[in-house]
């Protein structure tokens, strides 16, 4: 089963800038996939389109067989998104932010509470559950967004530059956590501009530059050619 299949994806932003020039990507269920590329390559645009936050200009996207154009609600249910910027209400408590996510996915309230406890504990945030999010460190906020993204137990977790601005120790613990949940079966796609991060974590890699996929291979094969 393919977790993600993208064909001929183009994005022309208003004003005429072509951020994606017809990309093809395919990610198998269970994979840990890195989309690697320099700033401005089109990583966030790609992720934005997959998670239906950005309109595409042309091409097709499907997630676990659900088509973005015709099966959007089903597609959305498959995806947990961890965006780059902190996009939660800083005045809500940590647990509220996670539990409130239930409303978007029809997760029953009681189940949402149980899951929020499970994920906040796993991510080391349980002690902070009654604190307003604004009191958290940057690394904690990032982990909060991971807990929130997992609440509806998506099959595909997408993270946009998850360790940007995170110190090395915390980065390691995030890497460990992502590796663990991937081993438990969740497919993960992350964007990064660090080859080391892709190397540490991922099985397969797509390299994107100026809106085009320039390489799509396994990490092993990539490292063998360097
Ligand atoms: P969409 O086609 O997804 O609706 P738009 O082209 O309407 O996206 O752009 C969304 C917003 O981002 C606009 O207000 C636009 O002005 C702004 N924007 C413009 N240039 C950039 C840029 N280089 N990086 C990020 N945002 C930009
Ligand atoms: P990355 O995530 O790889 O850094 P992005 O997908 O954010 O790249 O951006 C790809 C290109 O599209 C960049 O040149 C960026 O300036 C441009 N861009 C991004 N968002 C917008 C927007 N809303 N309007 C116009 N141009 C944009």
Image (spheres, grey):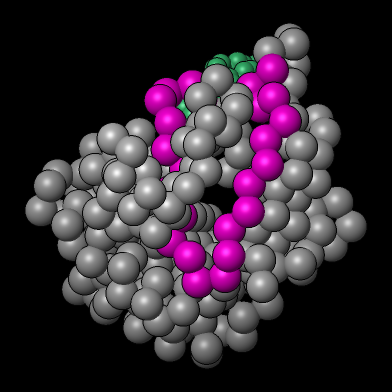
Q: Main secondary structure of the magenta part?
A: strand
Query: In percent of the image, x 80 and y 46: which residue is there?
Result: 60
Between 157 and 103, the one lying in front of the other is: 157
Tell me the quadrant of the picture where the N terminus can be found: bottom right
Q: Position of residue 158 (x, y in %)?
A: 50, 55
Reply yes or no: does residue 20 show up in magenta.
yes
Query: In percent of the image, x 81 and y 39: which residue is there?
Result: 59
Position of 219 relative to 181 (above/below) = above
Report which quarter residue 79 is drawn in. bottom right
**Residue interval drawn in magenta:** 18-41
Q: Position of residue 126 (x, y in %)?
A: 25, 75
Reply yes or no: does residue 117 show up in magenta.
no
Between 224 and 217, the one lying in front of the other is: 224
Position of 73 relative to 135 (above/below) = below
**Residue at the limit of the structure toward the top, as seen here:** 15
108 on left or right of 126: right
Report which quarter residue 93 is drawn in. bottom left
Query: In percent of the image, x 48 and y 65: which residue is there?
Result: 31
Q: Position of residue 150 (x, y in %)?
A: 47, 70
Q: Position of residue 135 (x, y in %)?
A: 23, 51
Q: Is residue 5 visible?
A: yes
Between 189 and 213, the one lying in front of the other is: 213
Total count of labels: 0
Ligand 2: quadrant of the figure:
top right
Between 207 and 51, the one lying in front of the other is: 207
Position of 107 relative to 175 (above/below) = below
**Residue at the limit of the structure toward the front, as seen here:** 225
């Amino acid at each position: 089963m393919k977790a993600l299949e993208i064909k001929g994806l183009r994005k022309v932003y208003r004003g005429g800038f072509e951020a994606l020039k017809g990309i093809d990507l395919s990610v198998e269920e269970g994979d840990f996939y890195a989309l690697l590329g320099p700033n401005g390559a089109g990583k966030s645009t790609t992720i934005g389109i997959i998670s239906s936050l950005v309109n595409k200009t042309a091409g097709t996207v499907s997630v676990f067989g659900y088509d973005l154009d015709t099966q959007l609600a089903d597609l959305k249910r498959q995806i947990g998104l961890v965006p780059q910027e902190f996009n939660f209400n800083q005045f809500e408590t940590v647990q509220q932010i996670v539990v409130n996510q239930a409303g978007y996915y029809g997760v029953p309230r009681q189940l949402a509470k149980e899951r929020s406890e499970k994920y906040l504990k796993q991510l080391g945030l349980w002690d902070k559950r009654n604190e307003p999010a604004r009191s958290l460190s940057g690394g904690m906020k990032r982990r909060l967004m991971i807990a929130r993204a997992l609440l509806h137990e998506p099959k595909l977790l997408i993270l946009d530059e998850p360790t940007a601005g995170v110190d090395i120790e915390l980065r390691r613990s995030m890497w460990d956590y992502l590796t663990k949940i991937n081993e438990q079966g969740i497919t993960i796609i992350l964007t990064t501009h660090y080859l080391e991060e892709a190397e540490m974590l991922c099985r397969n890699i797509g390299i994107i530059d100026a809106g085009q996929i320039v390489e799509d291979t396994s990490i092993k094969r990539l490292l063998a050619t360097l």
